[in-house]
Amino acid sequence: MKFASGFGGSPRVMLFMLAVVLSLSAASPQGEPLRPASSHALTLVSIEMFPDEVDLRGADPSQRFVVLGTFSDGLQRDVTSRSSFDVADDEVAKIEGSSRIVGVSQGETRVRVEIEGHSTEAAIRVQDLVQEKTYSFTRDVGSILTKHGCNSSDCHGSVKGQGGFKLSQNSLYPEDDYKWILEGGTFHVLTDKSDDPKVPRIDLKEPEKSLLLLKPTMAVAHGGGPKFSLDSPDYRTIRGWIQAGAPFGEATDSSAAGVDGVEVFPSKFVLEPGGTQQLVVMAHLSDGRSEDISDQVLYSSINPSIVSVGGDGTVKAVGKGETAIMIRAAGHAVSALAGVITDLVPNYPSVPEKNYVDEYVFGKLRRFNIVPSDLSSDAEFLRRVCLDLAGTLPPPNRVREFLASQDPQKRDKLIETLLDSPEYVDYWTYRFSQLFRVGRLVNGGTTEFNAAYWEWIRDSVIDGKPYNQMARERISAQGWDGPSRHFSRFATENDPTGPQQVMGEQIRLFMGRRLDCAQCHNHPFDSWSQDQFWGLTAFFGSLVQVGWSDESDMVIFDNPAGRDYAWGQSEDIAKVIHPRTKKEVKATLPDGTTLPPERQFDPRMALAEWITGHPHFAEATVNRIWSYFFGRGIVDPVDDFRSTNPPSHPDLLAALADDFRSQGHDLKRLIRTIVRSRAYQLTSVPNETNRHDITNYSHFQPRPMDAELFLDAISFVTGVTDEKYLDTTRGHEPVGTRAMNLKNWSIDHSMFMEVHGRYDRAGKPSRTGPTLLQALHSFSGRTYNEKLGREGGRLDQMLRSGRSDREIVEELYLLAYSRFPSQDEFDRLERLLEESPSRKTTLEDLTWAVISSREFAYNH
Amino acid sequence: MRSIPALLIFAFLSFQLEAADPPARPKLTSLYPLGGQAGHTLEVELVGKFLDPLQVAWFYCDQVEAEVLKLERTEEPKKAAADQEKGSETKPYQGKYRALLKVRIAPDAELGAHYFRAVTPGGISNPLRFRVTSEPNVREIGAKHNELDTAQPIDSFPSVVQGSLPELGEVDFYRLQATQDQVLCFQVDFFSSTAPLGLWTMRPKLSIHERGGSWFDPNRDHRLVINDPMQHRPALAYKFPRDGEFFLAVAEVSGKVGMFENPGYQLRVFPGGTSGEASCAFVPDEPAHDGPLKWTWAGEAPQSLVPMVSERDFARKIEADWIESLQARSVLEESAEESGGGVSFDSFSEQEPNDQLGQALEVGAIPAALEGTIGGPGDIDTFKFKVGDGALVAFEIETPITKPSFFVPWMKVMDADGEEVVENLNKIWGRSGNFVVKYLEAKTTCSFEKGGEYTLQIRDITSRKGGSDFRYRLLVRNQVPHVGAIRPEEDHIRITPGQASTLELSVDLEEGFQGDVLLSVENLPPGVKAFPVVASPKPSRATEDLPPLRDQKRYRPASQKALIALMAHSSALPSRSPWLIDLTARPIKGGKMGEAFPIGTLPLLVDGSEKKRQLAANR
């Protein structure tokens, strides 16, 4: 990204500014048409086969294999169809089709695969073969319903179901599905009561007349169309299950073992135009075995304009880009990341790695044939890391010192200095004040509520408090001190938002998940049920306050007797009532654990322990922190983790989360790891291969400064602190307080900050991106204009001290951009100053132009 | 019984209606400095409204005296002139006055808060607090000292700095020299104690800083410690980590104190012992002497008074003679009979572990004082006691060290089946039933239908707090019907010769006291008479029309209103200074009269200016 750096004529030209500002909103290119990859001679370097060990059991067991070849250009390609398979002992197993092995009789053998002089083997064990299948509703019927999308969110798995027939999405609740099929009946969203006649959807006496078979074969009208034919294996499976008496399936039966997890191979891959990739999906069973379920799942491409996927799991390149393949199995979902590249880089450079972050980031770039940009210049790095760690521009003397230093360790040393600086405390207090929503309108009536809450955050940052402890203190806050103030508005009992809103916020904030949909029905795109939503909500169902002499003495606590309600309100308002069953819900964790009696006085601590101990907590935290440095999360938006929004770098996310968890949830350590990486320190100037990349961290993505930081930066450059954001009627911060250190969001009003998208802590969406108002504000706003020539301000002091034009220009550049002006910039500015009738006015204009430029307004 | 006084009052009130409008009551808003050193004389600036003519600045005791040196309007004369030009009529001056007082503090003046009030023909103003200290007083320098480089030095300890924060968001910095491990104690008192600031309470902020600089800014300070922003009256103790220069910052949490005239503060800096905060002798926020003040001013309505410490405060001391002291406010035979005759009680200290019902400490029959400590988060203490059939029992909790809202003791009593019988969590409707307000009460009463053994559990209301300072003393005793707190609705009486005035009082009847209360006034000035009590039921508030959430008899006493009429003879001599009158009460029941006990004192002003005005008008 290039920044405006030339100044011709009067800089205050509205059209110029509008052009500058509005150009910031240029859309990112997406979905480019495919061009053929560069063709050059490739040689196969190595191969690998998946799975490398197979255990075949039960009726008609089989396993699909996939072979990946690594070529001389560094790319992996699916070479399964070009490979030859050979089973050592065909009495034990045989090959079916090109790459499927079928168990024949009990025993052990090996399958060997060979291609272009490379070979590898996998072990095969066949045992416990049976002639007659033992049915499990979940595994057999649930899989078929899932595979054909019958229980998808746009069919019977939708909120209301279809035609009165409701299935849990993805067969998440097989007991419920079983009941609806066996007993029949019409589903209603708002109640579980129904007077409608119940007609079973299967006929045990005449299985072929079961609705469960007549509808998908279109023997009777079916809005969903045909799903399978009369001679299909799926038809036979369901018919067989009904003939067997439609059992739910015994948990003790090994063939009915539950599925603990699902895995796809390969989980990430890159295709060239026209390229294909076969997927293999394995179910990991509760009895320790694994089973090929590639034919029992539903495949779908998140972005079919990039890759398509067939019902057999074959992925095909369509257009350039990156997307995910969703694989839905009964009760489980998993995704594989797929990328399509066009331009192969013939001599991909070797990229140095600083730490494990680089290993994952650059590893993916390599797979995608995207070359990372160069390391940032010292000036670029200095400005960026100061803003990102301390929210503060470096002073000119530090810029000179850093740029002049020849110390090879100077970047790491600077990072340590910044991490230990009081400005780090200021900045991360500000960050967490935003995140935890410190604000008078949010936290209740008094300024001291804010102050107490803000001070708790500040102390936590100073003390380097482990983030899981910080989260526990916030979620479970009781009493009168800092974090408890977060709940003060809610705890006034008749808050219309109810405990469900408070619960939802905690899960968004600390687990990165949006549960809101599950308030009214099972989550349509994720595995959160309505029961889980209300079970979690009930943890906040006893959150109340006891008042003392005035509201500032208000003490937050949990009363096992529950909340109270306003005069005339239903008693149910005070309880957590399941909207569908109309029954009171007890605090229940998603795994069904209920609160023991001894914890009734402190339910939120139990929840806090569960949240902070859950893998989602560390994942969500590292993702959020990562987003502060790269402008987007590995999962983006950062609070929208779901199966249909997979991470761009799942391995990196897992590694960061593991590291964070194992190192005591140490935020500073996490931040250090991120900013020390080369990935963070890449320049924002793109190269030919990464110009259009916005998701893979191939170059630094410039981003506008937060409103508070921007205001502070202007104050810093002009040497004039802002006093106008202070509200004189309800509160007042000390003169000279930096915007970043304001405690009372919603009181400390500032037109400048509102215009520049100050984060709204009350929860309303903030304006993002450049606006016309911002442009107009820069022309006529007080912040930009009144500070320029203020007596005692930076420019005034420089003029009084007799500095030359060159010295003043250099100082301004160091202040604003953390770099020296180029010779060209010097020459042009000198000409401008020579021609101007008023040196002071022109220097004011220059200052204005500097603080109005994109190079200044952006962190880059 | 009511007819004669009622008629008298009616007659007097009717008379008053016909009289000319009296001059407005003076109102004080601030003073500077907020106090002085015993044995010294100093000039004090006072700001308020309706102060002209200021007769006297009157203290409750003769240890502190004030002389009015000067009185002037705070408004610019040209503004007044402009107003005069604009308007056809000249309106009475409504602006503020600034008075300069010379205050003499006797060498033996009691240390602590002394209250004073301005007296004008309009009456007696609201009080302001003037704190007398033993330490040398220094005044804040005139120049700004809002950063480290301009910080005002405090050269010696102990000392008291008289400062003010007249600008919005102002911070005052003070420079100190400390030695390693030295403990210094800081206590700041703001001006607002009884100034009419409405619902807003000032929250002083104290913090200690050191120079340190940062990579970004070599002049940046490092904040080492800050007081809890939730404290109304901060007291900060700090053990200095090294020898050297440190800085103390004084500010107000919201920064808006500068909206007020003369927003003064008084900062005490004194050395502590080696044990940190515990060794700091912080001055409690209590009057210097008990004599004239049994009440303090209610924050939201500065004119009305509340008892300094009532029997329903967690702060009261439940000592060995507690039951006896309650009986003294009753009719002896009755209370002795109804309370089962027991006035002495044993104390029982909890023994851990006792979180579970089965681990209760058995204390036997009541009365009994249960003592213990909520030693840590989630700690519960359990006791068992016995009562007889139909027992009327009172539970009184004292928190001798840490008080609400820091330690909020929550008590529950359960029967043998574990069913809750009573708890001290009270609920009332807030804002006409819009929501429920909960209170943890220091006193709860209960009628036990069935006699037997009951279990009592006490804990902090949170599961987060606890410690050695979370001590409680819980007295379980038979109820003693008695006269409770008595509160005047006004904080002074102004009476004109030849006219009448009234004083309304609220009388609490505790634990089912059914008798009458005779209220009398003594030490009246010559020519002024008082008429006996007229009792009437207290009118209920709107929210009390709603069905109660809890049986309020358990948590609140019955209350009656009483009206005392006072009449000044036309020959009564007007006084420049108020006259302190004594109020006493005496319970009456079943034809028997209990012992008289003092209620407190009130200032009474016999004002002659009205009479002069009327005489002048008649001529």
Image: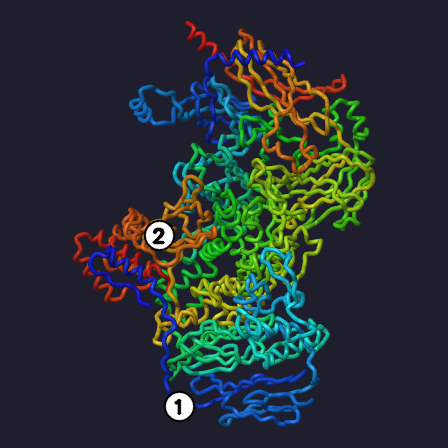
Q: Secondary structure at mark 1?
A: loop
Residue furthest top as drawn: B619
Kindly identify which chain the residue marked by label 2 belongs to.
Answer: A
Instruction: Say whether residue B360 is left or right of residue A637.
Output: right
Residue A625 coordinates in the image, percent (x, y): 49, 63
* Residue B616 x %, y %: 42, 8
Against B413, residue B481 (above or below) is above
**Closer to the camera in the image, B180 or A455:** A455
Structural distance between the alpha carbons of marks 2 and 1? 59 Å
Q: Amino acid at mark 2?
A: Ser
User: Residue at label 1?
Assistant: A41
- Measured as percent of width and height from the top left, residue B26 is found at 47, 22
Q: Which chain letter matches label 1?
A: A
- In the rendered structure, the answer to whether residue B535 lies left or right of residue A225 reads right
- Please name the residue that numbered disc 2 is placed on: A715
Judge the density around disc 2: few (<14), some (14-19), many (≥20) Cα neighbours within 10 Å.
many
| Residue A334 vertical position relative to residue B181 in the rendered view, above or below | below
Q: Is residue B598 above or below residue A466?
A: above
Q: Residue at x 36, y 61 (%)?
A: A858
The part of the image, by quadrant, that contains residue B397 is top right
- On whether disc 2 and disc 1 are found on a single subunit, the reply is yes
Residue B293 locus on image (x, y percent): 60, 25
Where the C terminus of chain A falls, by quadrant? bottom left
Which of A199 and B408 lies nearest the eye of the viewer? Answer: A199
Viewer-proximal residue among B479 and B427 = B427
Image quarter of residue A846: bottom left
Would residue A278 be found to the left or right of residue A836 on screen? right
Amino acid type at mark 1: Ala
Give the foreground label among 2 and 1: 1
Of the numbered discs 2 and 1, the one sitting upstream in the chain is 1
